[in-house]
Image (cartoon, rainbow, N blue to C red):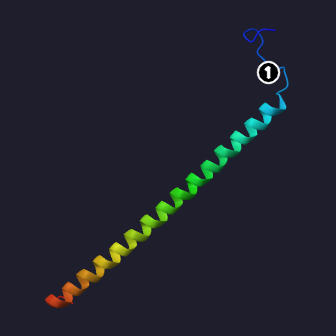
């Protein structure tokens, strides 16, 4: 039977091919999970930096306001 007329889908996959596909899928899944964790860490770190910067700016302007007699 030719691949063009009916394809090979009627044939069972060779165990080595099935194992290789499973291994490849596992690698993809692990890489996806690692990428998601890395993105979560970047987002968390970025938010922490934003919070610290906002707090420092607030303290700076508060101190400046006190020195100038606004507070």
Work out which quarter of the rendered image holds the C terminus and state it.
bottom left
Q: Secondary structure at mark 1?
A: loop
**Front-most of residues 14 and 43:** 14
Say if 52 sits above or below 37 in the image.
Answer: below
Question: In the image as oriented, which residue stretches furthest toward the left?
Answer: 68
Q: Quadrant of residue 55?
A: bottom left
**Residue placed under numbered mark 1 in the picture:** 9
Q: Which residue is at 17% across, 90% downward?
A: 67
Q: Residues within 10 Å of mark 1 (few under 14, many from 20)?
A: few
Say if 32 sits above or below 52 in the image.
Answer: above
In this image, 25 relative to 57: left or right?
right
Question: In the image as oriented, which residue stretches furthest toward the front?
Answer: 16
Q: How many discs mark residues in the rendered view?
A: 1
In this image, 40 relative to 21: left or right?
left
Q: Position of residue 45 (x, y in %)?
A: 45, 66
Q: Which residue is at 51% across, 56% downward?
A: 39
**Front-most of residues 30 and 62:** 30
Say if 57 sits above or below 22 in the image.
Answer: below
Work out which quarter of the rendered image holds the N terminus and state it.
top right
In this image, 61 relative to 69: left or right?
right
Q: Quadrant of residue 49?
A: bottom left
Q: Position of residue 4 (x, y in %)?
A: 72, 10
Q: Position of residue 31 (x, y in %)?
A: 61, 48
Q: Which residue is at 17% across, 88% downward?
A: 70
Say if 9 sits above or below 66 in the image.
Answer: above
Q: Which residue is at 82% across, 27% downward?
A: 13
């Amino acid at each position: 039977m030719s691949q063009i007329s009916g394809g090979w889908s009627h044939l069972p996959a060779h165990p080595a091919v099935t194992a290789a596909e499973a291994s490849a899928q596992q690698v993809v899944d692990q890489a996806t999970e690692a990428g998601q964790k890395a993105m979560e860490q970047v987002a968390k770190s970025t938010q922490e930096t934003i919070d610290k910067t906002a707090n420092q700016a607030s303290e700076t302007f508060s101190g400046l306001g006190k020195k100038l007699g606004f507070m």
